Image: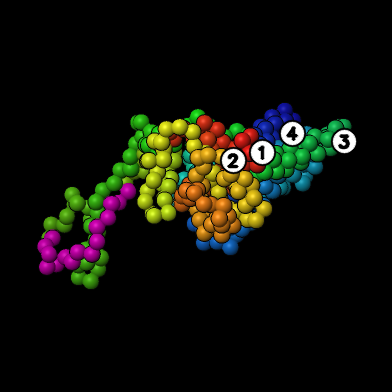
Amino acid sequence: MKNVLTVCRYIVGVLFIISGLVKANDPLGLSYKMQEFFEVWGWHSFNDYTLALSVLMIAFEIIAGVAVIIGWQMKLFSWLLLLLIVFFTFLTGYALFSGKIKTCGCFGDCIPLTAAQSFWKDIFLLLLILLLFMNRRRLPSPKNTGRALAFLLASVLVGFGLQWYVLKHIPLVDCLPYKKGKRIQEQMKVPPGAVPDSTVISFVYRKEGKEVEFTADAFPDDFDEERYQFLRRYDKLVRKGNAEPPIKDFVLLAPSGADSTSQLLETPGTQYWLFVRSIDEASASAVKKAIQQLKPLLLVTPVEEAVRRQLGEALAGVLVLKCDAVAVKTAARNPQTLYEINQGQIMNKWALRDAPQIH
């Protein structure tokens, strides 16, 4: 039994550490996923706290994983792990059985899992953690307390330090469709071999005061326009496909309202696109410096009014393009992210503060 518990400890610990490190590479990704759950549940007031929750949860995964492997305070951590895995299993189960959330983001964007894969992974972990929980009094404590504390402190520093770094800059490993080397227009296409949604046309009529619904190939035998009053028709989803491009809703609107996406993506030569997710007085000075030093420079933002208010006359001669907030969140993990673009291909990208072109 001792060997079984040891194997369980290492499996649980390693999985939690991997999960935490992958998400620590991009804590904003988990924050946005939390917002997706809160939007579905109508808990809009929690959206302002998702980043803090994301950072704490990711750090705890790494710390708990290390604690389980070294056997630190297992009476406490077995309880915390059990509560956490029950919570995760609820989330992945909800994503799977409700169909309202496509993925749970359990391993971030670098290791994408379907809702079903995430759920069964959590069921597996739940069984292992239950075994550890029921035998928590039999689990050995670390023999060298000083070394154990050093490992635990290191996990705290890594858990919070890595997240602090990537939030100040950009993810160390870019797993998003806007990564360096990708061509944006290609990422906007449905991948070859993708399976489209399977739908059937459904009609809704009123008959004798009641609504009845049937498909185009199953009209009732007594159908006639006197008995049946047409209400509406819609495409009913029969089987969900996977025919979605990696980049969705990426549209660049000129000040006139014209869609300039295709024209700008096919423009030859080096361009600099500055994605401005948000702006304040402190960041406005860095943006002004970029405007002065980088040519040609385009500003892409979902907060056009705030940008114009903060930058004022500095925007003279600069094309400001409006873009969907969700698309910009994906493209710009830093509030001000600079892209070097050539005919739609991402040659390089930086947090604006790290761009080597800015002196």
Viewer-side label of 3, 2: 2
Disc 3 target residue: 145
| Residue name at image x 66 percent, y 38 percent | 359
Q: CA distance from mark 1 to mark 2?
A: 8 Å
- Along the viewing direction, whichever of 170 and 18 lies nearer the viewer: 170
Q: Residues within 10 Å of mark 3 (few under 14, many from 20)?
A: few
186 displayed left or right of 139? left
Disc 4 target residue: 69
Q: CA distance from mark 4 to mark 3?
A: 14 Å
Disc 1 target residue: 359
- Along the viewing direction, whichever of 324 and 131 lies nearer the viewer: 324
Determine which of the numbered discs, if any, sits on residue 293 in the image.
Answer: 2
Whether residue 353 is visible here, answered yes or no, is yes
Give the mark count: 4
Instruction: State the extent of the magenta-drawn residues as a range.
Output: 223-237
Q: Are marks 3 and 2 in contact (CB under 8 Å)?
A: no
